[in-house]
Image (cartoon, rainbow, N blue to C red):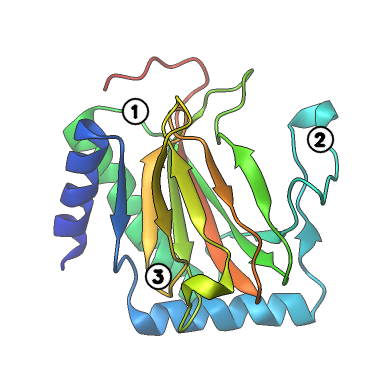
């Protein structure tokens, strides 16, 4: 599937139901390169324990969120390839949905065995800049018994789907509308979380 066709599928889904799960978002070789880079960062102690909250309320709560993260800057060849695809998606969503996405931010996330992330939404109460969330997975041969599933819920807490974090797969959804959680992983779990952003307090046109 071409980048344009994939972006079109995402736009259609966001407009109609607000979310989509994609069997293939990035090419297999790119997923391998990103996974290797993440593991190199881990070996270099470049990952930091993820915090919850925002600004002065940020705090470490491993009982709520147990992953370690590193922000992407697009500088490496693998990240540069990914950023081209993310920018193409941002441009397509703006052209088709008139959503006003100004930029995106992304980080690696590595969950050690036993780690999880309790149910949450990606948009902060005092900062609604994040409008579209995209999670890309980097794990080979993942099985349901490995845990680490992404559970996506409606605003009324009804379970919509459980997504396996298989390499190259992705899930995209409206950041403000869908609570989600990561169930405890029984093996190391690697992913990239990305958020497409608008200026704070921009109305959502969908």
Q: Earlier in the sequence, mark 3 or mark 2?
A: 2
Instruction: Find residue 81 and name its label.
Output: 3
Location of the N terminus by quadrant is: bottom left
Q: Is mark 3 on a helix, strand or loop?
A: helix
Q: Quadrant of the C terminus?
A: top left
Mark 2 or 1, nearer chain start? 2
Instruction: Check if mark 3's residue and mark 2's residue have beta carbons within 8 Å.
Output: no
Crowding at dot 1, Cα within 10 Å, few <14 / some 14-19 / many 20+, comes out as many
Q: Is residue 149 left or right of residue 1?
A: right
Task: Using the image, determine if residue 60 lies above or below residue 22.
Answer: above
- Is 69 situated above or below 125? below
Q: Give the Cα distance between marks 3 and 2.
A: 31 Å
User: Left or right of 96: which side holds 119?
Assistant: right
Q: Position of residue 40 (x, y in %)?
A: 69, 82
- CA gap, disc 2 and disc 1: 28 Å
Secondary element type, mark 1: loop
Left or right: 67 in relation to 58 = left
Q: How busy is the neighbourhood of tag 2: few (under 14 within 10 Å), some, or many (20 plus)? A: few
Work out whether residue 184 or residue 127 is closer to the camera in this orientation and state it.
Answer: 184
Residue at 29 percent across and 67 percent down: it is: 23
Disc 1: which residue: 100
| Label 3 Cα crowd, 10 Å radius (few <14 / some 14-19 / many 20+) | some
Residue at numbered disc 2: 58
Kindly identify the residue that appears in the image at 35 percent across and 19 percent down: 204
Q: Measured from the top left, where is residue 181 in percent x and y?
A: 57, 47
Mark 3 or 1, nearer chain start: 3
9 to 102, vertically: above or below: below
Residue 68, quarter of picture:
bottom right
The residue sitting at 81% across, 49% down in the picture is: 63
Nearest to the eye among marks 2 and 1: give it. Answer: 2
Q: What element carries label 2?
A: loop
């Amino acid at each position: 599937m071409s980048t344009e066709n994939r972006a079109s599928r995402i736009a259609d889904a966001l407009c109609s139901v607000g979310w989509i799960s994609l069997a293939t978002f990035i090419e297999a070789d790119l997923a391998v390169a990103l996974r290797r880079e993440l593991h190199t960062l881990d070996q270099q102690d470049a990952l930091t324990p993820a915090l919850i909250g925002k600004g002065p309320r940020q705090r470490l709560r491993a009982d709520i969120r147990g992953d370690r993260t590193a922000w992407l800057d697009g500088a490496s060849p693998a990240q540069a390839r990914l950023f081209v695809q993310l920018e193409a998606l941002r441009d397509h969503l703006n052209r088709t949905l008139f959503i006003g996405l100004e930029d995106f931010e992304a980080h690696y996330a590595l969950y050690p065995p036993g780690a999880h992330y309790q149910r949450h939404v990606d948009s902060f109460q005092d900062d609604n800049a994040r409008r579209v969330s995209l999670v890309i997975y980097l794990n080979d041969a993942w099985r349901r018994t490995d845990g680490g599933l992404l559970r996506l819920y409606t605003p009324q807490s009804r379970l919509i789907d459980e997504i396996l974090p298989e390499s190259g797969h992705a899930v995209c959804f409206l950041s403000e509308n869908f609570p989600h959680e990561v169930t405890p992983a029984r093996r190391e779990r690697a992913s990239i979380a990305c958020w497409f952003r608008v200026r704070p307090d921009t109305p959502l046109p969908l």
